[in-house]
Image (cartoon, helix red, strand yellow):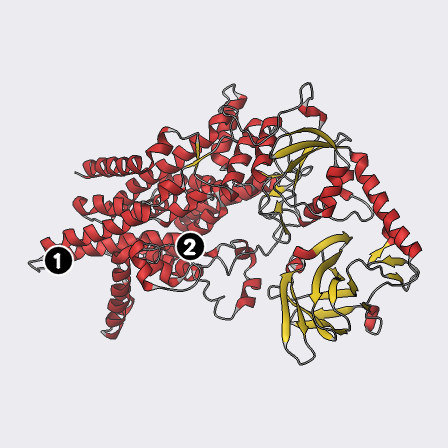
């Protein structure tokens, strides 16, 4: 009967998914589950790595000339490595990689339903309950939301497999089970380290319970040490050592952005805010992640809490909080409750934000809301377990009528949730494969070899992933750049990765920032071949990007995009021209033109404004006598330091009567126009409406708990005016640029 139940579960889920996703399943290579963003990036990195990279654990797809470890690219390392092995053996499936990925992800939900069913068998739930429960749970899984971009987190079988293996080990421990668990730790870590974190959230309390709560079976030190080593310590050490060999120690961020914005909301877990009938609740705010456990999960959760409190009152001790007759499941359930608290941001969101700075590697798990994943499965499985227990033990005559209604309502939740996904995940694309025509790119010039170029520089430029600078995340050239790179085999100078080296980030940003002295990245290029510029005509270029195109040779174009050739020596000419322009300004102007306010902090110690990151601070407070459009610029130290560019700053303008008429809130990285070493120049415009307006500039950084910010040379000048200054050491400054930088 159990085998029949497993077969029925597989057939039911397979049939439902085929009915919903048949367009994708039958045309898997023509549809992208993602409509852009991280999903496109993952697809691009996967295909490029299979098709063009020579190494297995490094990729040159982006961040040219430095490349990146494959473990920072979301390219589904186990799948990609397998396809790359096949290619090296003579079977190139890179054109079909996206379709293969789509099918494997969808199949993972079938596999997940099977393991959920097996978990019910371990909990001794009747087959007639386990089958519909397994189907309902997997269709309502919040992991469906990951299909739109985070493919490595979309594989639904991962957590059910972990739960099942731990339950099996508790029932009948063995070295084979531990070995299988250890192999999966390596494979799942290679998929995504969030999965490793999910495992740890469950595995550590599980083993504490085994060692202390069941000493007769599991309490021997030799037994504990052996199985702990086999299950996790050695596998993860092996993974860490191996990945470290292929990832040199870089200045990656220690504080990825997104911890607080990515928290899951309590109402998103226990209320149907993402379902049609949940709209009547009118709960305000943004829901970045849904993890609804269904009405049955909500009721069961309330029952567990109330019953536990009553049990404590009746002096049942901690047994009052047992959710099943299986001690291992009980500990995993409450471990997942702790995981839920993390997903809610607790305790950090309780006005204890600074605690996050002392959590070590945990800070790297920025999308903390994902820690709701383990709770979803334990809560929903437990709810059906309790329903089965109630039905088995209740003497209520109407239970035979009530049970189908409960299952129908639970199934309705699942249906209302999953029915929206097929349309969202059916995104026809052609850019990823040579089997199809992608008309956005211009015709490649006849007789021109791709090897004539060393890399592609997409414009408008984009660089997302350093966690300190975000540039061009809405650039229309992103997808065409992926297509051009796959077609030509040329890597991209741009970045759409995660935790990219800050030093490497700045070297590449120098290419599209204002020319200032030199281009350090030029010294890291392997040769002097030109860059291939790919320009999307719908994109907005900054003045420096326009200069790059103006100095390049047009190769080919169509209505949307154009190819240009940029000689390396042209970069030097751009630098020389910018210096000559500033020198001309310096020679033509004796001091300043137009209204100018300059603050060099020469009256302060060390001649700079220096402050610790403890609270908001105002570093500029002056009166602007005239109206008009003003350009504000100032230098900050820390352009190459983790978190410093993420400092918030804001500009206030007040009338003489004290009323505020301008509030401009932004970040340092958004307004950096050039840099010199560790110093970055901030520049932006404001419109002064009233004469005698009070101008205030303030800043804060809520993440940094140690260190200080240094500000220097604040300049407020009319747009179009020139300000010339001789520095204390004899250097010449023109509009806050130092001529000696060249």
Q: Is residue 731 above or below residue 453?
A: below
Name the mark on residue 328.
Answer: none
Q: Secondary structure at mark 2?
A: loop
The quadrant of the image that shows the N terminus is top left
Q: Which residue is at a point 26% across and 58% down the rendered structure image?
A: 295
Of callouts 1 and 2, the N-terminal one: 2
Q: Is residue 685 above or below residue 153?
A: below
Task: Choose mark 1 or mark 2, whichever is in front.
Answer: 2
Name the mark on residue 289.
Answer: 2
Q: Secondary structure at mark 1?
A: helix
Q: Which residue is at a point 58% across and 41% down the rendered structure image?
A: 476
Residue 397 location, quadrant: bottom left
Q: CA distance from mark 1 to mark 2?
A: 37 Å
Relative to the observer, which residue lies in front, 203 or 154?
A: 154
Q: Which residue is mark 1?
A: 393
Left or right position of 435 against 318: right
Relative to the observer, which residue lies in front, 189 or 208?
A: 189
């Amino acid at each position: 009967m159990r085998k029949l139940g497993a077969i029925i579960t597989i057939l039911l889920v397979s049939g439902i998914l085929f009915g919903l996703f048949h367009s994708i399943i039958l045309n898997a290579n023509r549809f992208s589950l993602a409509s852009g963003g991280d999903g496109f990036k993952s697809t691009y990195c996967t295909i490029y790595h299979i098709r063009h990279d020579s190494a297995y654990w490094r990729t040159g797809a982006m961040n040219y000339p430095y490349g990146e470890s494959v473990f920072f690219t979301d390219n589904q390392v186990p799948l990609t490595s397998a396809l790359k092995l096949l290619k090296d053996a003579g079977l190139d499936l890179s054109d079909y990689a996206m379709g293969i990925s789509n099918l494997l992800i969808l199949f993972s939900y079938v596999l997940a339903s099977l393991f959920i069913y097996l978990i019910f068998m371990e909990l001794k739930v009747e087959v007639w309950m386990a089958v519909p429960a397994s189907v309902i749970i997997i269709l309502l899984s919040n992991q469906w939301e990951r299909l739109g971009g985070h493919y490595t987190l979309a594989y639904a079988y991962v957590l059910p497999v972990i739960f099942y293996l731990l339950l099996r080990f508790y029932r009948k421990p063995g070295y084979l089970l531990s070995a299988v668990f250890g192999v999966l730790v390596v494979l799942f870590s290679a998929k995504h380290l969030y999965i490793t974190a999910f495992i740890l959230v469950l595995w550590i309390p599980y083993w504490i319970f085994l060692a202390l709560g069941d000493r007769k079976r599991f309490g021997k030190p030799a037994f504990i040490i052996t199985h702990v080593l086999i299950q996790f310590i050695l596998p993860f050490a092996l993974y860490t050592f191996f990945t470290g060999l292929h990832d040199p120690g870089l200045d990656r961020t220690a504080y990825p952005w997104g911890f607080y914005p990515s928290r899951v909301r309590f109402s998103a877990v226990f209320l149907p805010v993402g379902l049609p009938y949940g709209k009547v609740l009118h709960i305000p705010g943004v829901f970045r992640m849904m993890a609804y456990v269904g009405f049955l999960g909500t009721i069961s959760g309330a029952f567990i809490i109330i019953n536990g409190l009553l049990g404590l009152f009746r002096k049942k001790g901690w047994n009052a909080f047992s959710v099943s007759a299986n001690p291992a499941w009980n500990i995993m359930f409450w471990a997942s409750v702790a995981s839920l608290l993390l997903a809610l941001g607790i305790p950090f969101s309780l006005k204890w934000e600074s605690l996050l700075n002392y959590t070590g590697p945990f800070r790297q798990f920025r999308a903390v809301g994902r820690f709701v994943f383990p709770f979803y499965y334990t809560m929903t499985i437990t709810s059906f377990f309790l329903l089965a227990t109630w039905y088995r033990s209740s003497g209520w005559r109407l239970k035979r009528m009530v049970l189908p209604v409960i299952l129908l309502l639970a199934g309705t939740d699942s249906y209302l949730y999953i029915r929206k996904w097929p349309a969202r995940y059916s995104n026809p694309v052609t850019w990823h494969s040579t089997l199809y025509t992608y008309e956005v790119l211009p015709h490649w010039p006849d007789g021109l070899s791709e090897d004539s170029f060393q890399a592609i520089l997409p414009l408008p430029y984009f660089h997302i992933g350093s966690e300190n600078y975000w540039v061009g995340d809405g650039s229309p050239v992103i997808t065409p750049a992926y297509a051009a790179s796959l077609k030509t085999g040329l890597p991209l100078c741009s970045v759409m990765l995660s935790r990219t080296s800050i030093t490497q980030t700045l070297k590449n940003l120098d290419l599209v920032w204002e020319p200032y002295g030199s281009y350090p990245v030029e010294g890291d290029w392997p040769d002097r071949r030109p860059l291939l510029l790919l320009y999307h005509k719908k994109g907005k270029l900054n003045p420096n990007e326009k200069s790059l195109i103006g100095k390049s040779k047009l190769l080919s174009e169509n209505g949307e995009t154009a190819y240009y050739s940029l000689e390396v020596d042209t970069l030097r000419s751009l630098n020389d021209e910018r210096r000559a322009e500033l020198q001309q300004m310096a020679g033509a102007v004796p001091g300043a033109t137009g209204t100018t306010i300059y603050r060099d902090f020469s009256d302060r110690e060390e001649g700079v404004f220096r402050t610790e990151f403890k609270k908001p601070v105002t570093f500029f407070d002056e009166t602007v006598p005239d109206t008009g459009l003003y350009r504000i610029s100032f230098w900050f130290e820390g352009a190459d330091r983790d978190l410093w560019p993420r400092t918030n700053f804001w500009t206030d303008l007040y009338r003489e009567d004290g009323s505020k008429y301008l509030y401009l809130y932004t970040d340092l990285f958004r307004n950096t126009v050039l840099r010199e070493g560790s110093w970055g120049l901030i520049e932006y415009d404001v419109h002064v409406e009233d004469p005698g307006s009070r101008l205030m500039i303030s800043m804060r950084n809520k993440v940094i708990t140690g260190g200080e910010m240094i500000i220097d040379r604040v300049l407020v000048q009319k747009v179009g005016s020139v300000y010339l200054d001789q520095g204390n050491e004899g250097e010449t400054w023109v509009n806050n640029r130092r001529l000696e930088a060249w």
